Image: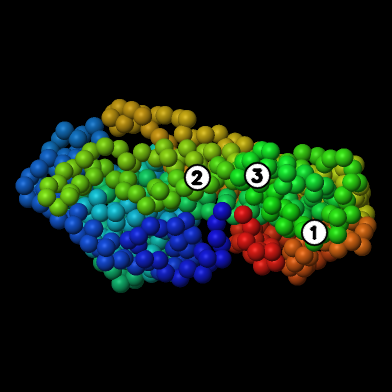
Amino acid sequence: MVDTRACNQISQVTLGERLTLEEFVAVARNHAQVHFSPAYCERVRRSRAVVEQWIAEERVVYGTTTGFGQLCSQTISQDETEKLQEYLILSDCCSVGEPLPEEQVRAIMLMVLQNVGQGWAGCRLQVLEYYRNFLNKGLTPFVPGEGSVGYLSVEANIAYVLLGGGKAYWQGELLEGGEALRRAGMAPIRLGAKEGLSLISGTTSPTGLAALALYDMLQAVKCADIIGSLTLEALKGLISAFDPRVMEVRPHRRQGETAENVRRILQDSQVIEEARGSHLQDALSLRCIPQLHGAAKNILSLARETVEIEMNSCCDNPIVWTDGRQSQALSACNPDSSYVGMVMDSSAIAAVGVAKMSERRNNRLIDHNLSGYPWFLTPNPGLNCGLMIPQYSQAGLLNDMRILAYPATVDCTPTCGNQEDYVAMGYNACKKAAEVSEKLEYILAMELLSDYQAQGFMGTDAARSGVSHCIYQELARHIPPLDQDAYLNPHIEYLRELIHSGKLVQLAEDRIGELK
């Protein structure tokens, strides 16, 4: 899972050692300041010295003294190496469509710093200082987000601002790149040999987008445990389905942890205690919470492990290898985005599973025949629709999610005159994961709205759990009693932000300690 509280408390991050998902999000989303460690700076200087030696020796090195892709057999003279890098950036600025959100552009820049800072890429430290200043000063390049197979075009729009081209946001205003640099106290620079290639090659955009989407998914599935528990209580469900003995005989770790979460959330609920033995078993959307949520957490945990490895890797090509005695340019394919692409495709499928169960639980709350409560949780159904239509919205969002859950990485459209005859398509997998995570948050928010409204119809004086009480108390500060039809969008947006910001998790964990 993720530590939201720790993420929100991080104000600065020093690159040079292993970067965690929480630290990554603190920079990309929360604008934590970025510093370079002495080890980071030394690694960068060492690899740059190797590249400059190769140029002086007139070695043939891919993308440094040769063309790119299918043009790798075309050699470039020493006096044209800088122009080669500039032309590369210009030719690759061809992504299209709506610009990426600020946090995603920041995530990509942070990934470039991580990629090059491993010491195997060959950029000058001065170039990386520019990206660090972009992050710390809040200068955000304008980056059209459509049209990448995993690298190049998205990153090129960021790199072009270094040259004074393109566009960038400065203090909320979209400016020409050179003007944005000037206002931020910087001037355009020229790229040296290999630098343009290192800035745009690699898995930097897929990994940056994946990190943000995965953080939100991990948080959302923890919220699903909380919201699912509130629904179990509202429907007077049986806690026996979460018995540790049930988990022991099917010992998937995260299934057991999910059941433990539910038991802890409802440990002091008199409603749940009174429901013991009242019926034989609940519907699957209630009693199968540990099994489905646990399976989703399994996928997301693997995704976290994979994304964090990628965050702390060098994904450039070629690799500037040196052991201090000899050096070599190793041309291979660490820019392949299969790792992050495949785990984010899988994560999208896991998120759909959590969302479809949430919608079914919500449907049980609003259906009089299933819950025993008034239709659509309104005291006067007929004149009022109550919470009828949020379930429609859930259905529409779920349809979107199912479309988005189709794996991007199963596709392969060759590029570059068949020099790149296999293409991973990891960028699209990671880009759509961000949409999936947002829609999951909305679906959970609508279930939570029904949980909150159902309290008025439970017909018992039995006390809710302490966690339920704290959450409903917080919701009551923002959502008035829904005695008649009302404008629901602001309430749904508030509840979604409660999930997205991590506050819902904090409300529960402040009461019972960290959830698993």
Query: Residue 479: where, in percent of width, then height?
Result: 77, 65
Which tag is nearer the camera, tag 3 or tag 2? Answer: 3
Distance of label 2 from label 1 (alpha carbons): 33 Å
Task: Name the residue beneath numbered marker 3.
Answer: 255
Which comes before the other along the chain, label 3 or label 2? 3
Badge 2 element: helix
Badge 3 element: helix
Query: Residue 89: where, in percent of width, then height?
Result: 27, 48
Query: Residue 301: where, in percent of width, then height?
Result: 53, 47
Left or right side of 9 for 169: left
Q: For the residue carrying disc 2, how many other residues have a C-alpha within 10 Å: few (<14), some (14-19), or many (20+)?
A: many
Badge 1 element: helix
Distance of label 3 from label 2 (alpha carbons): 17 Å
Residue 507, image quadrant:
bottom right
Which comes before the other along the chain, label 3 or label 1? 3
Image marks 2 and 1: residues in contact by CB distance under 8 Å: no
Left or right side of 277 for 67: left
Residue 469 in sight here: yes
> Which residue lies at the image location 24% right of the left edge and 50% below the top edge?
120
Left or right side of 493 for 153: left
Name the amino acid, label 1.
Answer: Tyr
> Which residue lies at the image location 26% right of the left edge and 42% below the top edge?
317
> Which residue lies at the image location 75% right of the left edge and 67% below the top edge?
470
Task: Name the residue beneath numbered marker 1.
Answer: 452
Q: Is the residue 413 above or below the residue 234 in the image?
A: above
Image marks 3 and 1: residues in contact by CB distance under 8 Å: no
Name the amino acid, label 2.
Answer: Ala
> Which residue lies at the image location 34% right of the left edge and 49% below the top edge?
313
Query: Residue 282: where, in percent of width, then height?
Result: 82, 41
Task: Name the residue beneath numbered marker 2.
Answer: 303
Distance of label 3 from label 1 (alpha carbons): 26 Å
Choose between 352 and 299: the one closer to the eye. 299
